[in-house]
Amino acid sequence: MVRTQIQLTEEQVRALKRIAVSQRLSIAELVRRAVSAMIKSSTAADVEERHRRAAEIVGRFGSGKRDISKKHDLYLTEAYRK
């Protein structure tokens, strides 16, 4: 592990202490879990990973329509209205 120093407001420290006591965890563990959760839920996913996932689903779905490349905006608008 890497030791680091952060600055928190007094209100944040009080809240963390209450949570730490109630969950029988250290404040450091709470901070590590919060950071991990933020990383996992981050919308700034790695660009290469997003491209890889997008490429994996290409061709897996079919609409039966043959003009989607020309009318994709129209079809998207219709889909959101539903």
Image: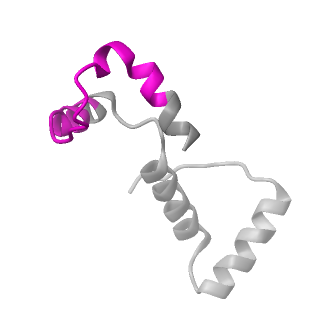
Q: Nearer the viewer, residue 45 or 75?
A: 75
Relative to 37, is 58 on the left or the right? left
- Whether the magenta-drawn stretch holds residue 68 is answered as yes
Query: Eyeballing the image, is 14 above or below 53?
Result: below
Where residue 54 sits, quadrant-wise, is: top left
The picture places residue 78, in percent across and down from the top left corner, at 50, 33
Query: Eyeballing the image, is 5 above or below 57?
Result: below
Residue in the image at 72% along x and 75% along y: 17
The picture places residue 60, in percent across and down from the top left corner, at 16, 41
Quadrant occupied by the N terminus: bottom left
Residue in the image at 47% along x and 51% along y: 41
Q: Which residues are magenta?
A: 51-76
Q: Nearer the viewer, residue 73 or 32?
A: 73
Residue reaching furthest to the right: 11
Relative to 47, is 13 on the left or the right? right
Judged by its main secondary structure, the magenta piece is helix
Relative to 37, is 11 on the left or the right? right
